[in-house]
Image: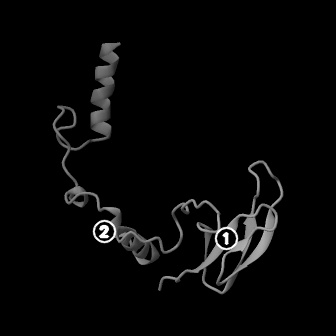
Amino acid sequence: MAARLLLLRRVLRRVAPRAPGWATGAPAPVRAASAGGIPTDEEQATGLERKILEAMKRGEDPYSIFKPKSYAGTKEDPQIVPSVGDKRIVGCICEEDNSAIIWFWVHKGESQRCPQCGAYYKLVHHEVPP
């Protein structure tokens, strides 16, 4: 068995030559492209991805990527609804196991209540990033 492996190794060396030192266990030569290391996401990001990464460094969430903060839904602490306009439609799942969604409009100004469960929602103006 060992003789076959040695013979196969000798044949493969003639047919498919490798980089110098491959059979002796010497380290493979370093490619020039990897000499400087792998670029980070910040170094190679462009366009919209770059804008998002820069905003995230400043602690902003311009495109609502993160999970929204949880609010109590009371009159003093209403659920915040971001909008670029003066009104927005909201769907409220009043109970956790409810399969129906109650849809209603939330307008700019005072907070409004869900017609079924009474949770409060308030519209807040959201700037669209340039």
Residue at 17 percent of width and 31 percent of height: 24
**Which of the 4 image quarters holds residue 4?**
top left
Residue at 83 percent of width and 58 percent of height: 100
**Which of the 4 image quarters holds residue 70?**
bottom right
Cα separation between marks 1 and 2: 40 Å
Residue 83: % across, % down = 62, 79
Q: Considering depth in this image, is 18 or 75 the residue closer to the camera?
A: 75
Instruction: Single out the mark in the foreground, 1 or 2.
Output: 1
Residue at 66 percent of width and 87 percent of height: 86
Residue assigned mark 1: 121
Residue assigned mark 2: 43
Mark 2 residue element = helix
State the count of labels: 2
Among numbered discs 1 and 2, the one appearing first in the sequence: 2
Give the residue type that dot 2 points to. Answer: Glu
Give the residue type that dot 1 points to. Answer: Tyr
Mark 1 residue element = strand
**Which of the 4 image quarters holds residue 34?**
bottom left
- Mark 2 Cα-neighbour bin, 10 Å: few <14, some 14–19, many ≥20: few
Q: Considering depth in this image, is 104 or 110 the residue closer to the camera?
A: 110
Residue at 61 percent of width and 59 percent of height: 72
Residue 84: % across, % down = 60, 84
Q: Is residue 1 above or below residue 78?
A: above
Q: Is residue 122 above or below residue 77?
A: below
Left or right of 101, for residue 128: left
Left or right of 82, for residue 89: right
- In the rendered image, the quadrant that contains the N terminus is top left
- Mark 1 Cα-neighbour bin, 10 Å: few <14, some 14–19, many ≥20: many
Q: Considering depth in this image, is 130 or 40 the residue closer to the camera?
A: 130
